[in-house]
Image: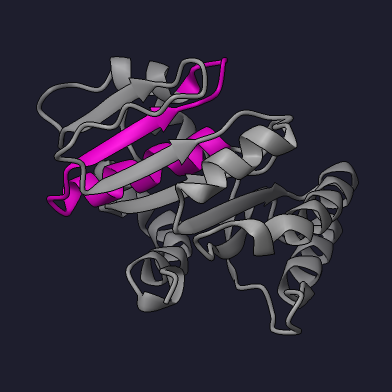
């Protein structure tokens, strides 16, 4: 089972938007997808509840007492995580994942929070049984701003403990298309291509990574 976790303990970074769009993408490719909503706010669960039956099917589970009851036929599991994860819970979720997507918003507070979280993550990554593959994305970016450029520079230059660069995949703009899709239980990939061409182009590097061996532990 392919397992992808969307994680950043800083609230407001758009984890649910990323999780729902990734889930819809794999579902549209014919995969049996389960979307696990671990956030008490239930944003991913709410998104699924308004998704019409005519669109590709996605199983939804709400995690209670930190237990993931995943349907046996699941081919791709997407885990949407809450803010302010404690170490014990964080380790538990990470042990189940192969790939981690970390969205970061372009603000000084979010960049500092990302620095602290990555330090924490690297400090115990070696104790996790399955070596997880990590990639960052800049999310909800207002293009051509100084803070967006600062975030891009920061994410591009992060290094793993072994000295290699942490993969920085893409910058996703702040777009009304994401709001329009979310209001209907849809993804950016289910809106008319003529209206979402630029957004789809921004997603392309992340999707290539998720579909490659680079995102799966060796």
At horizontal 22% and vertical 33% (from top left) the residue drawn is 58
User: Farthest residue in the bottom direction?
Assistant: 163
Quadrant of the rendered image containing residue 68? top left
Looking at the rendering, the stretch of residues picked out in magenta corresponds to 15-43
Height in image: 217 above or below 51? below
Magenta span has 196?
Answer: no
In the displayed structure image, the side of residue 112 where residue 44 appears, left or right: left
Residue 119, how many percent across, how many down? 83, 58
Nearer-the-camera pick, 190 or 37: 37
In the displayed structure image, the side of residue 26 where residue 130 appears, left or right: right
Q: Is residue 141 visible from the viewing direction of this image?
A: no
**Quarter occupied by the C terminus:** bottom left
Height in image: 105 above or below 156? above
At horizontal 53% and vertical 40% (from top left) the residue drawn is 93
Height in image: 97 above or below 152? above
Residue 49, how many percent across, how many down? 30, 15
Residue 145, how many percent across, how many down? 79, 58
At horizontal 68% and vertical 30% (from top left) the residue drawn is 83
Q: Is residue 111 visible from the viewing direction of this image?
A: yes
At horizontal 28% and vertical 49% (from top left) the residue drawn is 25
In the displayed structure image, the side of residue 21 where residue 140 appears, left or right: right
Magenta span has 39?
Answer: yes
The mark tally for this picture is 0
Colour theme: one colour
In the displayed structure image, the side of residue 210 where residue 202 appears, left or right: right
Nearer-the-camera pick, 37 or 27: 37
Quadrant of the rendered image containing residue 211? bottom left
Nearer-the-camera pick, 67 or 200: 67
Height in image: 210 above or below 23? below
Residue 117, how many percent across, how many down? 79, 49
């Amino acid at each position: 089972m392919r397992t992808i976790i969307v994680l950043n303990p800083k609230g407001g970074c758009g984890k649910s938007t990323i999780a729902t769009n990734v889930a819809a993408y794999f579902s549209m490719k014919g995969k049996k997808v389960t979307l696990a909503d671990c956030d008490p706010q239930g944003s991913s669960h709410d998104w699924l509840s308004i998704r019409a039956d005519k669109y590709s099917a996605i199983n939804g589970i709400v995690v209670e007492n930190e237990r993931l009851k995943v349907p046996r036929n699941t081919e791709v599991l997407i885990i949407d995580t809450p803010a302010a994860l404690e170490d014990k819970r964080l380790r538990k979720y990470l042990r189940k994942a192969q790939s981690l997507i970390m969205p970061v918003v372009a603000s000084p507070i979010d960049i500092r929070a990302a620095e602290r979280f990555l330090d924490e993550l690297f400090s115990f990554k070696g104790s996790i049984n399955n070596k997880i593959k990590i990639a960052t994305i800049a999310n909800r970016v207002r293009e051509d701003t100084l803070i967006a450029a600062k975030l891009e520079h920061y994410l591009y230059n992060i290094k793993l403990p072994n000295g290699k660069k942490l993969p920085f995949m893409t910058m996703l703009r702040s777009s009304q298309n994401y709001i329009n899709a979310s209001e209907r239980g849809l993804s950016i990939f289910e809106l008319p291509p003529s209206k979402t061409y630029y957004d789809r182009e921004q997603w392309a590097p992340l999707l290539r990574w998720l579909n490659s061996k680079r995102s799966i532990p060796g």
